[in-house]
Amino acid sequence: MNAVEHYLMNRTSDEPVCAYVYDLNGLRDHAEGLKSSLPSGCRFYYAVKANSDQPILEALEPIVDGFEVASAGEMDKVEAVSEKPMIFGGPSKKNVEIEAAIESGVEYLNVESFHELRRLNFIAEQKGTTVPILVRVNLSENVSNSHLRMSGVPTQFGVDERDIPPFLAEALEMSHVDIAGFHFHAMSNNLDAEAHVAFVRLCLEKSADWRERFGLDARVVDIGGGIGINYWNPDEPFDWDTLAEGLKELDSADVELIIEIGRYMTAACGSYVTEVVDVKRNHGKNFAVIRGGTHHLRLPAAWKMSHPFHVLPVEEWSYPFLRPTVARDEVTIAGELCTPNDVLVRGEYVDELRAGDVVVFEYAGAYAWTISHHEFLSHPKPEIVYIEK
C-alpha cells in the first residue's frame, strides 16, 4: 500500500478530498541512494527552498551533510531541527539577513555582486569578525537547455564572469571576508545528465584557473543543483547514474565539491490528491473541475504544462441522477478558482474520469504548496499529511 492509498483508506472526513500526502520513508530511501552514489569527497546538501516543511527537514537531517538556505526564515527552520552546516544564498540579502547568517555561524555566504561584497565586509567589520564567502559566478556561456537558466544569460544572479578578476582583486583587499571558493548554481530542472557533467567540469576548470591566477586557497567548488524532474515524460527521467559516475571521473581530488539537491530530492515523495467535483463539456472540449487548483499547486500554471497525474476510481455514487463522465477522450483538469488560468492538466487522454473520482498529481513534493497563492478566493487549505510506516 502506497502513501496515498494509506491516506485515503484512513480518511474519515465527508468533505471532498484535497490533500498533500508525503511519503517520508520513500524520501529517506531516495536521499540515501543519491548520497551513496556520489564520489566519497562530495558533500551532499539539501536546497531548502524546494520544500521547507519541518517533517521533510527532519527526515533528511540524518542523511544530508548540510543545508542550502535562501532567507533568514529558512535559517530558522533548519536551526530548529539541525546543527549541520548551512550555505546562505540569494540575490537580495537584506542587512538583517546577513547579520543573522553571521550570528548563526553559517558555513559559507554566497556573494552575488560588488555592492553585496562591500555591504558584507562593512557589516562583518562592525561585528569584529571575518566571513567565509563563496563567489557566485554567472558564467559567460550557456551550460544546458534546462527549463530555467540563471547563468550564461542576463539574470539577477551572481557576478558576471567577465567581472570576476576585478571582483576577486577587491575582495582580497578586504579584511573581513575570506574567499573560500566559488558557487556556480546555473540552472533549474535540467534533464540532460551529460550536459550536467560537462557543466561541473567547466566549474572545476574555472575555479582552478582563478585560484592559480590570484594565489587563492579557495578549495570549495559548489556546483549548486538544478537536477530536473521530467514532468512532460516521467518515463524518461534524468539519468542520475550518468551524473554520479561522471562526477567520479572528474579531477576533483584537490577541492571540496558541494552539490545542492532540492527538486530532485523531494519531488517524488509528495502527491497532491484532489476529488473531481464536476465534469462538463464546453465548446467541444471536456473539463473536469476539482476541489483545489493552482492556489495549492501553482507549478503547472506557471510552466504552462500538464502536471503528471493518474486517476483513482471511486465507485460510490450517492446521487439519484446521472454521474458526469468523460471516457476515452481528452480532458482539461481545472481548479476551483474564478480564472481560466486555473488549469493543471491541458487536454490529456483518460480512459475514464468521473465526478467523485480522485486525481493524484505526482511529483508534488517540491515547488508545489509553498510557491502557490493560497489566499486567492479564501478557499479552505488542503490537508497536509506525512505518512511513515
Image (cartoon, grey):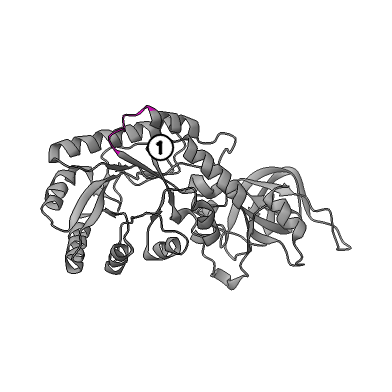
Image position of 328 with respect to 71: above or below: above
Outermost residue on the bottom side: it is 378
Compared to residue 164, the image places residue 11 above or below, namely: below
In the rendered image, which quarter is residue 355 located in? bottom right
For image coordinates 40% across by 35% down, the residue present is: 40
> Residue 203 in magenta?
no
Give residue 250's position: percent from left, percent from top: 34, 29
Q: Nearer the viewer, residue 129 or 98?
A: 129
Asked if the stretch drawn in magenta spans residue 250, the answer is yes
Residue 197's x, y, as percent? 38, 32
Could you tell whether 150 is left or right of 362 in the image? left
Of residues 159 and 257, which is closer to you in this image?
Answer: 257
Q: Is the magenta stretch mostly helix, strand or loop?
A: loop
Name, please, the residue furthest toward the left: 173
Using the image as rendered, state which of residue 82 and residue 138 is in the foreground: 82
Q: Is residue 168 visible?
A: yes
**Outermost residue toward the top?**
249
